[in-house]
Structure formats: structure tokens, C-alpha cells
Image (tube, grey):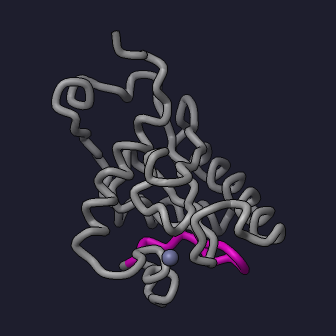
Amino acid sequence: METLWAPWRSAYLSEATENEAKNIRTGCVFCEALTNPDDRTRYVIHRGKNAFVILNLYPYNNGHMLVIPNQHAPRLDHLPVETRCELMELINKAQLVLQTVYRPHGINIGNNTGQAAGAGIADHLHFHVLPRWTADANFMTTVANSRVIPESLEISWERIREAWEKIL
Ligand SMILES: [Zn+2]
């Protein structure tokens, strides 16, 4: 029998698609986004001192964000304490922004460390922060293993970025 409690399935599925994208590119997509100054085309929400926030290109739901250290490192314990603290502050702000913009019923906050744990981009640590609704594991997800995302990344980026700048 399949386990019904599977909150990280969402992260796993988006990581799987992420991995496909990674395979057709060279280098690290997160490092590339970090060095590219164009926030709009890379869907960068915020650039901090030691970490940054972008939209997931393959969202599970609208508003699915990734909180990423600037340093290309695979594990949390490879990062300085200052960076770890900043990551947690950005995760906190990301969930506040999601509450404001999307008013979800719940929020998934999580990380997959290593490929065996489901990380698509295992070499560069990242945290998922995504809104959830009670009935969002819908028919399409269950039957066709695909999702319907009603809002474009462009619109999500504009809404989230605006809220990010307003919330202190
Ligand atoms: Zn990287």
C-alpha cells in the first residue's frame, strides 16, 4: 500500500524535472543565476549578502521558491554559520511573503541533501519553500503525474518580488 503521508513528494517531483534541465546544460544553474545580473529573466526575488532567493523554474505550485547559499556547496555543514543563519532568515521571510501573496493553507519548507535523498541539483544546496492547499494533490497529479500551474512565472515573480520589498 502506498503511504499517504508524503509531503516531500512535491520536492522530489520538482527536483526530478530540475535534474532533466540540468542535464541539458553545463555547469551549475544556481551559480549561473547568481552571476547573471538580470533578475527578471532568472526570476531572482532577492540577493542577500551570503544567499539569494529565486523562483523554481519547475514549480510544484505557484510561488514555489528556492533559498540558496551563494557558495557552491552540497551540504549545510560546509557553510559558515553566518550563511546558515542568513538562509534561515530568508526561509522565514519567504514563508511570510507566501502567506501574504497566496494565503495558502500550509507551507512546505525543506531540503534534499544528496541525490539519494531526492536532490536534482545535489552539488549546490538549496531549500524549497512552497505554498500548499488542502486539495492541491489533485486528480491530474494523482493520475497523470503532472500538474496544472495556473499562474505564469512572470506573474509570480512580479507579485512575490513586490511583496518581498514591502515586508521587512
Ligand atoms: Zn552552484
Residue 66 relative to residue 58: left or right:
right
Q: Quadrant of the N terminus?
A: top left
Residue extending farthest top: 1
- Is residue 162 visible in this depiction of the protein? no
Query: In the picture shown, does residue 146 fall above or below 72?
Result: above
- Is residue 71 visible in this depiction of the protein? yes
> Which span is picked out in magenta?
42-52
> Can you give x and y, in whole percent of width and height, for residue 159 in the image?
48, 60
Residue 41 relative to residue 129: left or right:
left
User: What residue is rendered at 71% in x and 62% in y?
Assistant: 87
Asked whether 95 falls inside the magenta stretch, the response is no
> Can you give x and y, in whole percent of width and height, for residue 126 in the image?
55, 60
Asked whether 43 falls inside the magenta stretch, the response is yes
- Judge by depth and name the residue closer to the eye, 82 or 2: 2
User: What residue is rendered at 57% in x and 49% in y?
Assistant: 111
Q: Quadrant of the C terminus?
A: bottom right
Rendered image quadrant of residue 141:
top left
- Judge by depth and name the residue closer to the eye, 119 or 155: 119
User: What residue is rendered at 32% in x and 50% in y?
Assistant: 16
Query: In the picture shown, does residue 89 fall above or below 124?
Result: above
